[in-house]
Amino acid sequence: MTKTQVANIGGGIIGCATAYYLAKKGVRAIVFEKEAAVGLEASGRCACGVRQQGRKAALPIAMSSVRLWATLAQELECDLEYTRTGNLKLVWETGKPEELESEVAWEHAQGLVEVCMLTAAQCRVIVPGLTERTLAGKLCPTDGMANPMRVPGAFARAAARRGVEIRTRTAVTGLLTRGSRVSGVLTGQNEIEAEVVINAAGPWAAQFNAMAGCHTPIRPGLDTLIITDRQPRRFIPFLRFGWWGYALQSRSGNLVIGLEPAQNEAFDHRVDYAGIAEKTRDMLEILPWLQVVTFLRAFSGITEYTPDKEPYIGAVPSLQGFYTASGFSGQGFCLGPMVGKIMAELVTGGDAGLSLAAFRPDRFAWQGD
Ligand SMILES: Cc1cc2nc3c(=O)[nH]c(=O)nc-3n(C[C@H](O)[C@H](O)[C@H](O)COP(=O)(O)OP(=O)(O)OC[C@H]3O[C@@H](n4cnc5c(N)ncnc54)[C@H](O)[C@@H]3O)c2cc1C
């Protein structure tokens, strides 16, 4: 029987970052990933936003993560295409600028002091071609983006250089227990003994938390992205248009346009063409020059939503040695590096340095979904 100190279920950004920070602490770990490579699900298909503004309970983790992102490329020895482009939230004529103003006040109180309100005229300087129907904007200049296709793999390779084993095409099918402790994982017929098991299985995580006796509702979502042809530089920041989605321009010039998530009980990757048709009509009301771009392709990823849109991070009290970092509710790419660091601290008995009370895995145990 194979033996390891830590078994990580899932090779997304959370599982790979956790494995890397564990390896830095000298802990032996194996990452089990059901797909042919790490990062093939949401972590490699996401919209690349490394955003702090608009976060709620997870804002302190996002702020710490942004500090890690600053030197991550150097640390992982890989160009992650991370840039602090800023994140600009636009208020459209039906929106309420006063809601963003109170968000600014709250974020300043949390220490995100660089966030500021912009007038419509200031927004049009940053994003030429915005129609007159834009009322205002809220800018966080230290927010940014990175290339999602590079990040989970970079963490996995850096972890492997420090001795972590990455087992792809290996689905975990069950947990092994001894009394009230977890003692490993099952992959089909194979038993792998582990002192600690970390569940980072993204939208699929609820089943393993349930095996450990913990009810963690996670609803799968369908997030669709449209990629256009390369354009001359049109704007720099990651743009958010509250009610329909977001847009950004990648380093190579392609525009990436994201739609708000749809339901996805089937856990599939279908493309929501009806949503695309409807939302692209709305988009032209905001950015009329989009009429001249060519849509090259669209794809989707499976996201993971909890009832309060906050993740589950920490030890699962009903099974000793079992931890979860799951249910990131559309925030996992930004938070990933810091969550990896937090998990490594928790597992080794260190101090995560941040309060995790809002992310208790058992917080819905007595409330139902
Ligand atoms: C289109 C889109 C846009 C997004 N935009 C952003 C954004 O701008 N900013 C942001 O912060 N976040 C964004 N997100 C959300 C972000 O991608 C996720 O929150 C994050 O990737 C979650 O990471 P994860 O490692 O928990 O999950 P995943 O990436 O889903 O990884 C979980 C892994 O576990 C594996 N797995 C599952 N079951 C098993 C099993 N039984 N055995 C072995 N392996 C298993 C899966 O194959 C998968 O690789 C977006 C997501 C999508 C889809």
Image: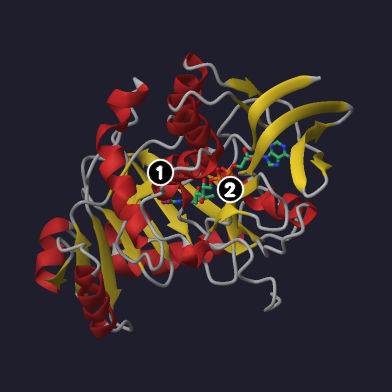
Q: CA distance from mark 1 to mark 2?
A: 18 Å
Q: Horizontal and vertical percent for residue 188?
A: 86, 31
Residue at position x 21%, y 48% from top? 236
Q: Horizontal and vertical percent for residue 24?
A: 43, 26
Residue at position x 48%, y 65% from top? 357
Three-letter code, disc 1: Thr
Q: Is residue 51 visible?
A: no
Q: Taking 206 as reference, is 248 left or right?
A: left
User: Any mark on residue 301, and which?
Assistant: 2
Specify the farthest residue to the right.
189
Three-letter code, disc 2: Gly
In the picture, the quarter occupied by the N terminus is top right
Label 1 CA crowd tier, 10 Å (few <14, some 14–19, many 20+): some
Q: Taking 180 as reference, is 257 left or right?
A: left
Q: What kind of colouring is applied to the model shown? A: secondary structure
- Above or below, 157 relative to 58: above
Q: Nearer the viewer, residue 314 or 258?
A: 314
Q: Looking at the rendering, which quadrant does residue 176 occupy? A: top right
- Picture quadrant of ligand 1: top right
- Tell me which numbered mark, 1 or 2, is placed earlier along the sequence: 1
In the picture, the quarter occupied by the C terminus is bottom right
Label 2 CA crowd tier, 10 Å (few <14, some 14–19, many 20+): many
Q: Nearer the viewer, mark 1 or mark 2?
A: 2
User: Any mark on residue 285, and which?
Assistant: none
Badge 1 vs badge 2, beta-carbon distance below 8 Å? no
Q: Is residue 100 visible?
A: yes
Q: Taking 362 as reference, is 19 left or right?
A: left
Residue indicated by mark 1: 228
Q: Would the CB of label 2 be found within 8 Å of ligand 1?
A: yes
Q: Looking at the rendering, which quadrant does residue 247 occupy? A: bottom left
